[in-house]
Image (cartoon, helix red, strand yellow):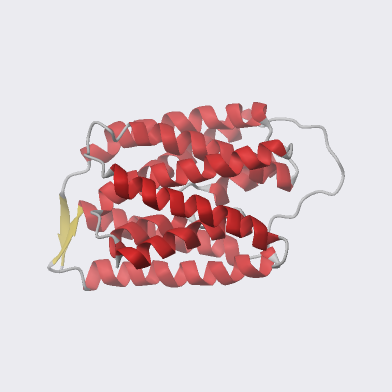
Amino acid sequence: MEIIGYIASVIIGISLGLIGGGGSILTVPVLVYLFGIEPVLATAYSLFIVGVTSLVGALSKYRQGLVELKTAVIFGIPSVAAVFVTRKFLVPLIPVHLFSVSGLEITKPVFIMVLFAFFMAFVSYSMIKNGIEENGDQQPQRFNYPMIVLEGTVVGILTGLVGAGGGFLIVPALVVFSKLPMKMAVGTSLLIIAAKSLIGFTGDLAHYTMDWEMLLIVTTAAIGGIFIGNALNKKVPGERLKKWFGWFVLGMGIFVIVKELFFNK
């Protein structure tokens, strides 16, 4: 199963390279079901893997002039603060046993996985539907600060809870609220994801003992996948792949819900 897990880690990177997102949503299921890692710890590992791979992608976009640093700082500050507080204080406060419904016990690991599954379903919808329409006229950049702070905070809390990057929320926010062109929004989003994921991960260091060897191998595999995905990006239609991947993510989300609620013994 670990060998399959490493192959899946490469696929995570390929997805990020091909369509600029989506791969991080698979990281937690890969860690839980293929590597046998406890769900709450898996969300911590996911933050590191997503953060490092996004940083590699952001550096590549920066060299192409597709990262807007001022926007990254303005959006990133509330997002980084929210994810750090969530990992450092909120997640440890969630009790191990939450409640029972008709004999079904909802524990902290089950809650995290089901929450993640609903997050996957929401992501899949954003990938299957038509993409954001970008105004073709070049507009001077302006910031809707209240909405940027609100969106950054919400994305940070979600990232802290489920360990996913949240690029599907960040990119639309940057296009709509910061008036960035789409390609610039994708590159800037990668930098924001890298910062909030890695800083959020530091909030877990005091709570868990990390298997650094496994973590670094999975991260390296995902980084390798990014370069493969970037190479394939020029040959494969990105929008078609995005919709196919969206249906796959939706299927994975349904699988996680059914397994955790009905077959989690």
Question: Number of numbered discs present?
Answer: 0
Q: Quadrant of the N terminus?
A: bottom left
Residue 14's spot in the image, x, y percent? Answer: 55, 59
Q: Is residue 195 above or below residue 158?
A: above
Q: Is residue 88 above or below residue 94?
A: above
81 left or right of 257?
right
Residue sticking out furthest to the left: 103
x 38%, y 71%: residue: 254
x 52%, y 72%: residue: 247
49 or 109: nearer the viewer: 49
Is residue 119 something that shows in the picture? no
Residue 239's spot in the image, x, y percent? Answer: 68, 65
167 or 222: nearer the viewer: 222
168 left or right of 201?
right
x 41%, y 69%: residue: 252
x 15%, y 60%: residue: 100
Instruction: Give residue 211's quadrant in the image.
Output: top left
Instruction: Give residue 242's quadrant in the image.
Output: bottom right
235 or 201: nearer the viewer: 235
86 left or right of 174?
left
